[in-house]
Amino acid sequence: MGKISQVSSKYIVNASINIEGVVDKPDVIGAIFGQTEGLLGAELELRELQRSGRIGRIEVNVETKNGKTSGMINVPSSLDKAETSIIAAALEIIERIGPCNANIKVQKIEDVRVSKRNYVVSRAKDLLKSLIDSSMPDSQELADEVMFAVRVMEIREYGKDRLPAGPLVDEGDEVIVVEGRADVINLLRHGIKNSIAMNGTSVPETIIELSKRKIMTVFVDGDRGGDLILKSILMIADVDYVTKAPDGKEVEEITKKEIHQALRARVVPQQVRLERSDGAQKPQQQFQKTYQQPVKPSPAKPVPTILAQRQPPISEKEREAFKIMSEELIGTRAAYLLDENLNILGKVPVSELQLTLKGLNNVHAIVFDGIADREFIRTAEAAGVKHIIAMDSRVKQNETRIAVATINEL
């Protein structure tokens, strides 16, 4: 006997059945075919319709309680609306099934296509929501992704130790030394192309050679391992500046803003050594303090002229040393920090001079390629500086306790 699947049917007739007695499913199906035979004409004969696939398999679900049987009848149909309605109405004429009285009532004719459309609409909403949530990347995200891929492709092996490095290590005057390959990649991601990795805790010969001919900044992680690497490289290489990632973070994971903050807060190695020997703050704490908590200079106050009597005299030895250093610094925009024996504690850019002074208290003299103004003099006074040698000065001698001289006066 032919049948039609639920998927290809257009309508489903749902009818309830109540029988005054006990019957089985075959009895119900037999009564449906038997009592509708010849009733609707040859074109709507149920057996012929089922054989041709226009009426599907008739499903009967019944149960018996207290000597009575009840249940549901489902008739799938691919006929049109009118023909399906005629078939549904024909079911209600059945009054007896076997020896028992029966009552069949059509509850509804379900349009399967409506159910399918409802499912399509519901599923389309879910898919659209998923599409919106996942959203396609905008043009900026695509550009960033492409730029990152290009920058990562720029990483190369440098020197005989084949160290991971950016493409501009050889081109500039400065180089940034980091711990590993991932650190180089993160710096490349943010446009810094002159970094090179040590690839371990030991200092490679390539790094030592670079330190002799370039301005080297060591950029380590903000953990105990970073301290050990910093200590190791300071003992071997000629390092100009040192800096660290924020406490507990690694260079490979910090953001662009944190990278630039750390590089702006770099200090000279002598400052780190002095902090350690004095038992003061740890290097990473000093870096953060230098950048995050700049001390705003207090408003200018008039200084009594009696301070001029406390200005330390410049000896001939000091005058000669200051003159030589001043001539060396012309055009460099840099500064020498000197101790009492006129030994150079460090060389720093003029732009970072005031920030560096705020972390030191043993600088005897400063020789720099710049102009000594009142704000700088106040910072130097707070640091205990005795002598300042500048290219020019905007401060009168009776306004400060520091001996201020220009290169022309030497």
Image: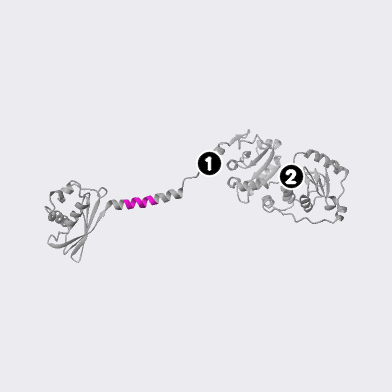
Check disc 1 and give the amino acid type. Answer: Ala
| Residue at numbered disc 2 | 350
Query: Is any part of residue 319 visible from this angle?
Result: yes
Q: Position of residue 334 (x, y in %)?
A: 75, 42
Q: Position of residue 301 (x, y in %)?
A: 79, 56
Tell me the CA gap for discs 1 and 2: 37 Å
Main SS of residues in magenta: helix
| Residue at numbered disc 1 | 143
Q: Residue furthest top?
A: 160
Q: Quadrant of residue 331?
A: top right
Check disc 2 and give the amino acid type. Answer: Val
Horizontal side of residue 164 vs 311, given as left or right: left
Q: Residue at x 33, y 52 (%)?
A: 119
Above or below, 94 relative to 376: below
Proximity of marks 1 and 2: CB atoms separated by less than 8 Å: no
The magenta span reads 117-125
Q: Residue at x 86, y 55 (%)?
A: 305
Q: Would you say residue 118 sits in the magenta stretch?
A: yes
Q: Residue furthest front?
A: 82
Q: Position of residue 352 (x, y in %)?
A: 72, 46
Q: Nearer the viewer, residue 212 or 405?
A: 405
